[in-house]
Amino acid sequence: MKNIMFILLALSLGFTANAQTKKDRDNYEIQVDGLGCAFCAFGLEKRFKEFKRIKNIEIDLETGIFTFTYPATEPLTLEQVSNQVENAGYTAVTTKISRWDGKEESLVGKKPDVEEELEVIEN
Amino acid sequence: MKIRIWLLVIASFYIQNSLVAQGPPITGDKAIMLAQGNVVLKTLTEFRKTDAGNFLKIPIMGHYILNNKMLVGVHLPFVNSTFTEIGKEEFSSFDLGDIELLGKYQFYRKDQMGKTFRVAAKTLQTLPTGKSYGIDGIQTKLYQSYIGIIAGYESIKYGISNELGYNIVPNSKVLGELRYKLGFGLPLLKQVYPVKQINLFFEYDSHWFIQADQYLLQYAQGIQYAIKRLTMEAAVQLPLIQTQKVNRREVSVYIGSRYVF
């Protein structure tokens, strides 16, 4: 009986930890222009893997939507993400971050280095 | 009648699948660089049959992307030459060919959803490390300096690549040439990422040897299979017009692969 209780306790702790892991990650969604081929998407992914704890990378070539998650304990800024797209050789049209606590941030602008074209919205 | 039906089937297949992406050109070049730090190892073996003999060029090529606009590379070719001219004894040799150093700089970029147009400057410096066989593009043992511009449009529907440049050969009165390459790429599979593609390429390659007043126009039909980081490709190239009196080309067959690290 003690063994069963121990297993149940361990399993419940495991589920809690897993739920906590998912909860503690921010979701990033970027509309990227210039992805004219799958090889381009490879270049973009490779550049973003410089962010060591990046996970759940998905790139839709038809829409240019690039999504990934990153630990909320080391949050990336909108400018960091947008600049990384630029560094990969592509254009970030919109960048959205859904923080783990429900807050949302977005950046609109094709040229992150041009201040007046940026519009940061925080909800 | 049967041929017409087959042509229609093939044409409809293209149309149905024309909304997907394609890979890099086979005999041409592209203006798009991958991300900074990428290393591309590739080879594109060429078997060329001419009226002077048969030549097999096996280059080992390494490209390094310095940043999203600059690329440098080195091409180390090994060449098997077999001269079979009528009335002469057959002669064969296997040597290191003319080593090439490559540099590209992308200076214009216009991105839109699912498509991009880019222009890059290119230079290719050929070192006289091969034998002096005088076979252009195979081995000449002549220093050559090529400067050109590549313009490429790639979309998820199709790709077009253009390259225009001039090859200076200081110690030759015949090999200096104006080059123009035009390539079209069409995919046969629905696009997916990670990469899994089969692409067809239709590539034209023209050489105008200005000093010698000779002209060569070739057409290459190529096919490419790409999966994840590996790409394999093959092409057959035939001369359409050639005014050279010697070293006239009959056919070239290319087989290659490339891997992105």
Image (cartoon, rainbow, N blue to C red):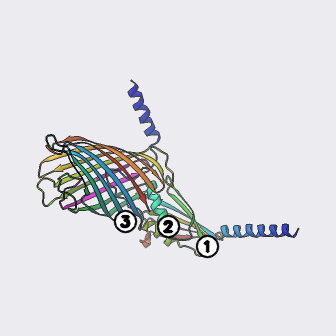
In the rendered image, residue B148 lying in the magenta stretch gets the answer yes
Q: What element carries label 3?
A: strand
Q: Is the magenta stretch mostly helix, strand or loop?
A: strand
Q: Which chain carries label 1?
A: A
State the quadrant of the N terminus of chain B: top left
- Kind of residue at badge 2: Phe
Q: Name the residue under label 2.
A: A48
Which portion, as a residue range, is magenta? B138-162
Single out the residue that lies furthest toward the front.
B89
Specify the amino acid type for callout 3: Tyr
Q: Count the numbered circles shown.
A: 3
Mark 2 vs mark 1: which is more N-terminal?
A: 2
Residue B124 in the image: state x and y as whole percent.
Answer: 25, 61
Left or right of B242? Residue A29 is right
Q: Quadrant of the C terminus of chain B?
A: bottom left
Q: Where B134 sits versus B242, above or below? A: below
Q: Is residue A104 left or right of residue B244?
A: right
Residue that badge 1 annotates: A72
Mark 1: give few (<14), some (14-19) or many (20+) Cα within 10 Å: some
Q: What's the mark number on residue B64?
A: 3
CA distance for labels 2 and 3: 18 Å
Left or right: A34 in relation to B242: right
> How busy is the neighbourhood of tag 3: few (under 14 within 10 Å), some, or many (20 plus)?
many
Q: Are the residues under marks 2 and 3 on the same chain?
A: no
Task: Pinpoint residue B207: horizontal percent, then vertical percent.
Answer: 21, 49
Residue B107 visible somewhere in the drawing: yes
Judge by depth and name the residue closer to the eye, B130 or B199. Answer: B130
In 3D space, how far apart are the residues under numbered discs 1 and 3 (Cα atoms)? Answer: 34 Å
Q: Is mark 2 on a helix, strand or loop?
A: helix
Nearest the camera: B207 or B43? B43
